[in-house]
Amino acid sequence: MRTFDNNVVSIVGMPCSDLEFSHEVFGEGFYNLKLRIPRLSEHVDILPITISERLLVDFEVKEEKLIRIEGQLRSYNKIINGNNRLILTIFAREISEEQEENVSNPNQIFLDGFVCKEPVYRTTPFGREITDMLVAVNRPYRKSDYIPCIAWGRNARYSEKMKIGDRIKIWGRIQSREYQKKIDEETVVKKTAYEVSISKMDVMPEENNRTDVD
């Protein structure tokens, strides 16, 4: 497997924030951007993007401009108010302008990683079955990205039985989800979570002798 084949993201959407300087690594500047991506339903996903200044030399980012981002879903830890928080962002490797008629699926991700936390099965108030998983995807230089994933229906029932260390391939989309968090008796703040919604999953039989799942 090549270095980046285990974490592949392709999204198409319109900018819904200004470019904001994030950080610098070895003299290379990186910027943050939010991209608005419609679902088949009336909902939209607002996803965070990290872009190198080198990709922006000959490319102008502006509202109402449909752009395609090819890259990876990355994670890092950040201390916020004394608490360690997992932050997700789509790290852009390529950026280009896109035509709407060429877009069939504007939100795609493929991951090949390992279950690194005991899966948690639950049902929603409407009776939908969900299993929450945390998947570790290896990166060069002994680093890993830790990606929250959600399985539905029969995939949820199957993944509930998976064990830490099981290798899994995932196809799906990246979604944003707003929720409210109670800070104290009088304060409730709105937050956004990002996760991978699984449409297909294969468990690697050579790693754990389990059956493939579509």
Image (cartoon, grey):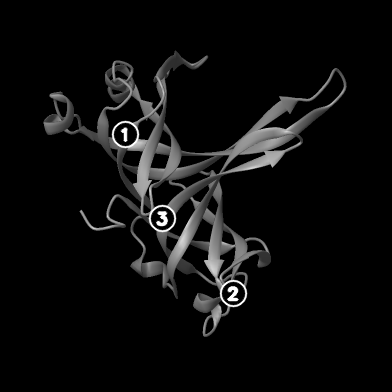
Which residue was labeled with disc 1? 114
Amino acid on which disc 2 is placed: Gly
User: 204 left or right of 121?
Assistant: left
- Residue 106 location, quadrant: bottom left
Q: Secondary structure at mark 1?
A: strand
Q: Nearer the viewer, residue 210 or 12?
A: 210
Q: Is residue 118 above or below residue 50?
A: above
- Residue 166 location, quadrant: top left
Q: Secondary structure at mark 3?
A: strand
| Residue at the image position 48 percent from the left and 69 percent from the top | 67
The crowd level at tag 3 (other Cα within 10 Å; few <14, some 14-19, many 20+) is many
Q: CA distance from mark 1 to mark 3?
A: 16 Å
Amino acid on which disc 3 is placed: Gln
Closer to the N terminus: mark 1 or mark 3? 3
Q: Which mark is residue 72?
A: 3
Q: Is residue 39 above or below residue 86?
A: below
Position in image of residue 14 (x %, y %): 55, 64
Q: Which mark is residue 27?
A: 2
Q: Nearer the viewer, residue 209 or 127?
A: 209
Position in image of residue 28 (x %, y %): 57, 73
The crowd level at tag 1 (other Cα within 10 Å; few <14, some 14-19, many 20+) is many
Position in image of residue 45 (x %, y %): 54, 47
| Residue at the image position 61 percent from the left and 73 percent from the top | 62
Position in image of residue 191 (x %, y %): 68, 36
| Residue at the image position 36 percent from the left and 63 percent from the top | 103
